[in-house]
Image: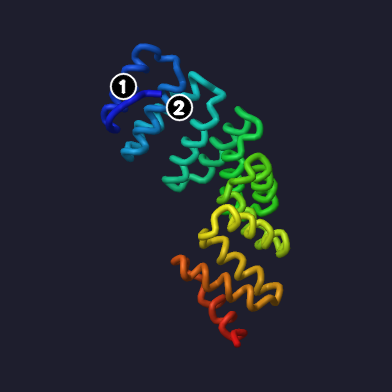
Amino acid sequence: MVQAKNADEFIAKARQAIASNPDCGSSHYNLAVALIGQKRYEEAEMSLKAAVHCSPNLAEAYVLLGGLCLNRGDLEGCLKHNKDAIHSRAGFSEGHGNIGFVYLQQGKIEDAIYHLEKAVRWNPRFVQAFSNLANAYLMNGQLDESIEANLKAIELEPNFPVAHNNLAIAYLEKGLHELAAKHCDKARELGYEVAENIVKEIETYRK
């Protein structure tokens, strides 16, 4: 790993490493990470493409390429790069998690569930994947599974507001109004903007 006092020095040293060994995928990847940190996205994308050209199994580089696509609203590009990531490394949880997220955005719920279940199977501490999986279950009418996935997310990260919001909705659907109110309050306390219709419905059941 390149040692440096600041980002500019890191970038300079990464470029030196590439100059001395242009076929090292890791050096191109390290440069891209630093460029992303400076919001130099076009340069970062070029470096990431060089990284996967040199090291086709560098799954993290595909994921970052997907992230750059997502940053500019290109869901299909994000999907493609994350598929490349899981093809380059079987069981790469972050790739499956991102694929699941994109499918969720596209309304392809069954496909989202398939990949998000894989993501949490490969990484049982993947909080965001549990939250997205819970959301997918909720959209699919699988209330018990949604509750279980949200509770797992909260077990890993107690102050994860999206999970509390989704629990409020799932418990409301099941008629468990006290639990719905508890998690609605927690989500709002954490700064999450719970949908007004959910808040109003919960208020009608408060004692």
- The mark lying in front, picked from 2 and 1, is 1
Look at the picture and state if 97 lies above or below 147. above
Q: Quadrant of the C terminus?
A: bottom right
Quadrant of the image occupied by residue 26: top left
Q: Position of residue 151 (x, y in %)?
A: 64, 59
Which amino acid does the dot numbered 2 rest on? Lys
Question: Disc number at residue 49?
Answer: 2
Which amino acid does the dot numbered 1 rest on? Lys
Question: Disc number at residue 152?
Answer: none
Look at the picture and state if 194 lies above or below 147. below
Q: Secondary structure at mark 1?
A: helix
Farthest-out residue, bottom: 207
The first of marks 2 and 1 along the sequence is 1
Q: Position of residue 138 (x, y in %)?
A: 66, 62
* Residue placed most toward the observer, 50 or 10: 10
Q: Is residue 153 left or right of 191 when viewed as pictured? A: right
Residue occupying the point 60% across, 27% down:
88
Residue occupying the point 47% across, 36% down:
64
Spatial separation of the CA atoms under disc 2 and disc 1: 19 Å
User: What residue sits right under mark 1 in the picture?
Assistant: 13
Q: Quadrant of the N terminus?
A: top left
Q: Residues within 10 Å of mark 1 (few under 14, many from 20)?
A: some
Q: Residues within 10 Å of mark 2 (few under 14, many from 20)?
A: some
Quadrant of the image occupied by residue 148: bottom right
* Residue placed most toward the observer, 134 or 5: 5
Residue occupying the point 32% across, 21% down:
15
